[in-house]
Amino acid sequence: MLTSLYIKNYALIDELHVGFNNGLTIITGETGAGKSILLGGLSLVLGKRADLSQVKNAEEKCIIEAVFDIANYDLKSLFNSLDLDFDLQTIIRREILPSGKSRAFINDTPVTLESLVALSSYLIDIHSQHQTQQLTQDDYQFKVIDALADNKSNLDKFTKEFVSYKSLHKELEQLKLSKAELIKEYDYNLFLSQELNEINLEKINIEELEEQYEELNNVEIISEKLSSTRAILSAEDLGTIDQLKTAKQELNKIANFGQSYDTLKERIVSVGIELDDILIELDNLEDKLSSDPQELERIGSQLQIVNNLFQKHAVSSMPELIEIRNNLQSKIDNTESLDASIIKKEEEIIKAKDKLNQTAQKIHKNRKKVIPIFVSKLENILSELGMPNARFKVDLEPIEHFVKNGKDNLQFLFMANKGSSFNELKKSASGGELSRIMLAIKSILAEYIQLPSIMFDEIDTGVSGEISNKMGEIMKQMSRKMQVFTITHLPQIAAKGDSHFKVFKTDVEEVTHTQLKKLKEEERIVEIAQMLGGISITDSALAHAKQLLN
């Protein structure tokens, strides 16, 4: 509930600080006295866009501050989601600086207007004839029926399931798009992969192949050179080995004459041993050497294949080629595995849809069950409000597709007079009728859920007599469960209030100021008497005012 309101430097208000109690609070005042200014200031606290032209003195800061007791509103989770400190006495403050910049605070924490609106919608509802139009909107009609049907937990569950369901559909579409893209490349990737897989890349040693190819391709010259080398080493008398033996014999004759001569002889011996080994190796190589045109062709062909692959894939080594082959295989595997992923995702969607259908069915059943009760209560109240022939109908039709709050179409239909037919509410109800319908609906809602404080702004326009008395009784009844404010011109309603404030203007040094005053009992009698008979108060008006108050 709103416990206090402070306004400084706003419109015609210099400074105003007023406290409020629970129950029904009446606000009266002559036309043009400034009741709209009070509502404007309160609207700023609730998140309305600020305007520098609303500031009384543009050189000073404008402040509007409202204090709310939120002990009964169960808003701790909302405060957590907005990252705000939770306090049972919550203070909302708006400031308009001389620069025109606006600032908002909740419990002294700076907040955005979006956060302010998110919280304020739970705190106070300013209801005017203009706002009765929301009654004709689908969202509000669902809100009314679902509140009476106690569908909050089901709707919360449906919302989570619906988000998950849409997410799964989005993932499925992405998988299908990915598959479509991969399919375009699949055949080509498969061809490249098969081409690379036809040769065992891991077992190919390109250097070894090249060496084998050079040997086979040059077998005749190799054989010739091996033979000539062998002849140089082993030819009798002139061969290197025989020459080396002669050198060894010569050095052996002087080996005893000094260490250096003996060492030199030993080196000759070592060279001789090495040449003997070389000769044996020459024999072995020559024995193994053979011409093999078929092997030469095979190796040449393999080298050609590998070099072509190097050129095609713009690489120069086997590890790079192996990496390309592996990447191609991954793309092929991904393409082939997408079918399984798509099937799995479709199965998940079927399960999610089943869960959604079950929750939507619960929501539908609860709505269907409560609609006759709602219609009966509404028609009874409208009859008391001077609309005895008014008939109401709520069409609830299941639909095939999911919407954000279930699988239903909902429509409020209205018939004001006998002999007419049901039609959409926005087409068949006048502004005055919509105001009374809204009041009736709000009074019904108050029986089922904890509504925020509500301020009725001249909702009684166009009614009088017994109907206004009944409207007052309805607001009085509502105020037993919630805080109700009403701005009214009707004495029958004003007399129902638990407290009564008067908005009035004063002129000080040719400057007009708007003020708000809480009326004492005698002042209240006078105010209601003036509402009954005008400025000239008669004894009968005073007596009537006392009678209304009693």
Image: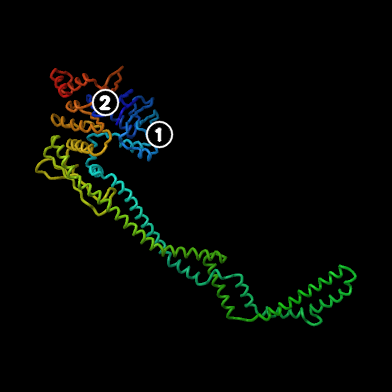
Residue 104 appears in the picture as rendered: no
Left or right relative to 503: residue 462: left
* 476 vs 176: above or below: above
Residue located at (28% from left, 23% from top)? 516
Coordinates of residue 163 in the picture (x, y in percent): 34, 50
Left or right relative to 424: residue 358: right
CA neighbours of label 2 inside 10 A, class few (<14), some (14 to 19), many (20+): many
Which residue, given by chain and number where applicable, does mark 1 sit on? 110
CA neighbours of label 1 inside 10 A, class few (<14), some (14 to 19), many (20+): some
Left or right relative to 212: residue 272: right
- Quadrant of the image occupied by residue 294: bottom right
Coordinates of residue 80 in the picture (x, y in percent): 38, 39
* 99 vs 534: above or below: below
Using the image as rendered, state which of residue 457 and residue 163 is in the foreground: 163
Which residue, given by chain and number where applicable, does mark 2 sit on? 34
| Tag 2 secondary structure | loop
The amino acid marked with disc number 1 is Pro
Residue located at (28% from left, 19% from top)? 507
Coordinates of residue 5 in the picture (x, y in percent): 32, 27
In whole angstroms, how far apart are the C-alphas of marks 1 and 2? Answer: 30 Å
| Tag 1 secondary structure | strand
- Quadrant of the image occupied by residue 187: bottom left
Sequence-wise, the earlier of marks 1 and 2 is: 2
Mark 1 or 2, which is nearer the eye? 1
